Amino acid sequence: MPRLTDPIQLGSIHASSRMLMAPLTRGRATREAVPTPIMAEYYRQRASAGLIISEATGISRIALGWPYAPGIWNDAQVEGWKAVTAAVHEEGGRIVSQLWHMGRVGHPDVNEGQPVSASPTAPPGHAHTYSGNQPYQAARALEVDEIPALLDDYARAAENALKAGFDGIQLHAANGYLLDQFLRDNSNFRTDQYGGPIENRIRLLGEVVDRLVATIGADKVGIRLSPNGESQGVNDSNPHALFAAAAKLLDEKHAAWVELREPRPGGTRGLPDVAPVHPVIRKAFSRPLILNADYTLEDGQAALDHGEADAITFGRLFLANPDLPRRLLEKLPLNPPRPDLFYTQGEEGYIDYPRWEEVGQPA
């Protein structure tokens, strides 16, 4: 069985190890969604990951509903990302852009329009906006004749990602965002070709993947799914059947790899309300499968040993420990994360977590 320290080929990307960095929203871009210089430093510091999956990045203004999150739909954003990818590559790392459409989880204070979704619904809770927390507004259903423009947005974002120097992209189809809203039956009440039975609810995912593959090649396209349990109010009555079908579809379209955000018992997300779905996805998808959610070095390696996964993404541990692979492998103490600074706009809690050699002890 492979070790976490072994390299892995993810489509066209040669990852130096199977210890990958998960996507982590941090809110350090400008209000115009342009990456900033401290973002280049942040990613440079973490380039020892086998592969970095960037923070979620909006494919259009209406797609982006999180304050100070980055986008990749215009030239200024591409130029900002060039500094990020150059910094990672200078350190010998690899990085992909996670393409994001938030759907109903957006808010007009940020995305400047009424959110769209599979159906006219609203998520629970409150949106994080420039004016503070506000109740979510009901989304309108995306019309069938609007889908070609949506596909154009994804294609433009993928092209821009390569122009910006990314090694590929990850399609965000998880966590209760737009594509997940189409996939799952408690948020998709459509009666057209995109709603109802599973084969209809996975249709938009397939069309987006087709367009991305045609635009940049299947070997540069990865996917993120969140198959087990509720996420931002989105859930499904039969996730094992749904995500087995989605995985089979992605396999047929030659997607390079799939990453799963799949909470586990004892994790920070609490007890999942659905049994693990990755075993049925593993059977349906023939290329690399990556697992995510509260893994340590030991249980990440156990997942590889048992053939459940080919690599592991680490999230909050990477957030607080830029040299995470070294710390895990050498069993060095870890810097504790500072949650109150996760989404602020400054350097504090972002690029000031020390490497081990800088202090010889945890911060």
Image (cartoon, rainbow, N blue to C red):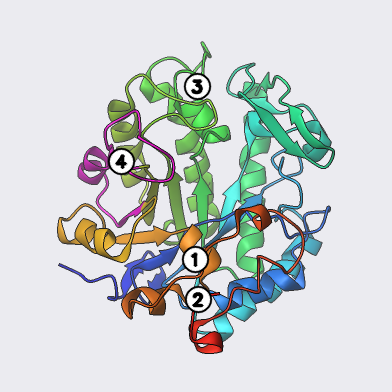
Residue 217 seen in this snapshot? no
Where residue 20 sits in the image (x, y, percent)? Answer: 41, 65
Label 2–label 3 contact, CB within 8 A: no
Residue 57 vs residue 271, the one in the foreground: 271
User: Which amino acid type corresponds to the residue marked 2 in the rendered image?
Assistant: Pro
Separation of disc 3 and disc 4 at Cα? 33 Å
Residue 124 vs residue 311, the one in the foreground: 124
Which residue does the image show at 70% across and 19% down from the upper left?
Answer: 138
Residue that numbered label 1 is attached to: 318
Q: Nearer the viewer, mark 1 or mark 4?
A: 4
The dot on residue 362 is: 2
SS at circle 1 = helix
Which residue does the image show at 67% across and 57% down from the upper left?
Answer: 341
The dot on residue 194 is: 3
Q: Quadrant of the C terminus?
A: bottom right
Q: Which is more N-terminal, label 3 or label 2?
A: 3
Q: Residues within 10 Å of mark 3 (few under 14, many from 20)?
A: many
Q: Which is more N-terminal, label 1 or label 2?
A: 1
User: Which amino acid type corresponds to the residue marked 1 in the rendered image?
Assistant: Phe
Q: Residue 282: within the magenta?
A: yes
The image quadrant that residue 13 belongs to is bottom left
Q: Which is more N-terminal, label 3 or label 1?
A: 3
Q: Tell me how many marks there are.
A: 4
Vertical placement of residue 131 versus 29, above or below = above
User: Which amino acid type corresponds to the residue marked 4 in the rendered image?
Assistant: Pro
Separation of disc 2 and disc 3 at Cα? 50 Å
Residue 175 vs residue 251, the one in the foreground: 175
Residue 203 seen in this snapshot? yes
Residue that numbered label 4 is attached to: 265
